[in-house]
Amino acid sequence: MNIERSIPNFADPLLHARGLYIGGQWEAGGGIPVFDPSTGRTLAEVPDANVSDAMRAVEAAEKAAAGWRATSARQRAEILRRWFELMTRHAEELAHLISLENGKALPDARGEVAYAAEFFRWYSEEAARIPGEHRHTPSGSHNILVDHEPIGISLLITPWNFPAAMATRKIGPALAAGCTVILKPASETPLTAYAMARLGEEAGVPAGVVNVITTTNPGAVTSAMLADHRVRKLSFTGSTGVGRILLAEAAKSVVSCSMELGGNAPFIVFDDADLDAVLDGAMVAKMRNAGEACTAANRFYVQSGIHDAFVAGLTERMAALKVGPGTDPGTQCGPMITKKAVEKIDRLVSEAVSRGARVHTGGAPLPGSGFYYPPTVLDNVPVDASMASEEIFGPVAPVYRFETEDEAVRLANDTEYGLAAYIYSRDLKHAMRVGKRIETGMLGINRGLMSDPAAPFGGVKQSGLGREGGVTGILEFMEAKYYAVEF
Ligand code: NAP
């Protein structure tokens, strides 16, 4: 199958890019097959960069760095704004591309494109608002001026679950700050990254400011780049395991790190919650991207009085979802990214069931080609089941019953992660009080969706370091410089 034929309205050559993109040049090649998760068949091939390709990307980013740093904030803002507009103009084609290589249902893919493009719009606005500071020393001896300078060449590594948004969430602030970048997208979903780089070129991003490479050898390639003293920043989104490896690598050259890692979000429902609102929120928190999201509700803790009604309502909604290829009209739950992902979900569900969990809908992989796992609801899940501590990363909702607030808080915090959490209660004061006790970077109160370019996204504990988005996201790509001034 070739990719042009699989997207009927994919007429724009801008979106066919798929070579290494180094110093403004496209370098064709192969070596990495990209699969369609709905069939398991190969969609396309992208080049497999080696260490010397990666070092050429560093060289290109270095060559472009001084010029980009010297542009005015307004110039950078206008390029980002044009990139936002191009993404918006090509939203439908980009959504199809994401849906094809990632598998997510088209409504999810459309939502991702809109969300991803917003990072360019937000950071086009923030580029002109980089803060500085003036203070007097307490002793009166001198003045303190604080300026923020671009941190330097930034290596951006992104996962497959949001192939557009995880890239723009990094490229937007990096470019707004005045940094040049090398993007290494996940091997499963490189086509979206290359298509977006082509749109960036069209938007006027100068050669070498954004470079994109794909590789089957991310460890060696990344280590080589991090060992080069011109690379000053590593911004990574992915699993906690890989994040730990990269932190250790970055430590060797004392490279600044932002880490957006795994999650294990609790979704806490108190007896007094509005059941319809809870179910609406639960469906979004669980089923956005078919559960393949770091913010996905991974554990539903539901108070006794509302437990049975919640399980019945959730089961009805989950069972009604249409499962199928992401690009098929009407699909609400697409395939998982790989066979391995389905096997992991199957392992977690089987273990829980063998220990007494009850299956209300779903519960086993779907037969046939493609990597499908159906929407699944379980209750009576043991609180120490593996799925309570591992990311399920699929359309499985395990429900656990609780009696008291203290019990809910203890269970919610009983994890190494701390990325996202959700609380539902009609009593806002109560919800806020419980929220203060939850160890998390982000909290949805009576809301199942929290991602927003204007908000600081990130986690505590093993979920990461630093924040992306919001007014502070740009500072992750800047260094504060203090001037002691006598005047
Ligand atoms: P992953 O396996 O950690 O991979 C993420 C990226 O790291 C990919 O580009 C991957 O490249 C690369 N990589 C893998 N091993 C590497 C190494 N030794 N050195 C350098 N790079 C390496 O994660 P994933 O499976 O793609 O994504 C799912 C994970 O991401 C989940 O844990 C999820 O919670 C997390 N996530 C977190 C956030 C957040 O904002 N906190 C957002 C989305 C996802 P290859 O593809 O070539 O292996």
Image (spheres, grey):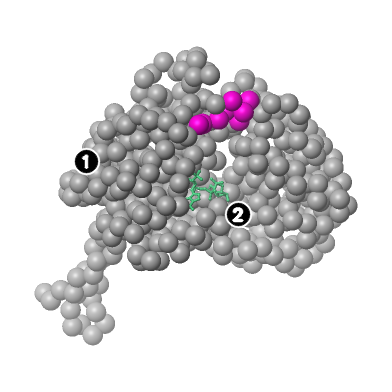
In this rendered view, identify the residue nearer to me: 138 or 116: 116
For the point 59% across and 60% down, which residue is it? 418
For image coordinates 21% across by 45% down, the residue present is 64
Region rendered in magenta: 33-41
Query: Disc 2 marks which residue?
Result: 263
Amino acid at dot 1: Gln
Q: Residue at x 59, y 25 (%)?
A: 41
Asked whether, in this view, residue 357 is left or right of residue 480, the answer is right
Q: Assess mark 1: CB under 8 A from ligand 1?
A: no
Q: Position of 404 compared to 238: left or right?
A: right
Q: Earlier in the sequence, mark 2 or mark 1?
A: 1
Horizontal arrangement in the rendering, residue 13 relative to residue 294 (left or right): left
Quadrant in which the C terminus is drawn:
bottom left
The image position of residue 338, as x and y in percent, is: 62, 37
Secondary element at tag 2: loop
Tell me if I can see residue 121 in this picture.
Answer: yes
Depth check: 186 or 204 in front? 186
Q: Which residue is mark 1?
A: 75
Q: Gap in Å between the C-alphas at discs 2 and 1?
A: 37 Å
Residue 55 appears at what percent x and percent y?
Answer: 30, 48
On screen, 34 above or below 380?
Answer: above
Q: Is mark 2 within 8 Å of ligand 1?
A: yes
User: Relative to 140, does residue 149 appear above or below in the rendering?
Assistant: above
Q: Nearer the viewer, mark 2 or mark 1?
A: 2
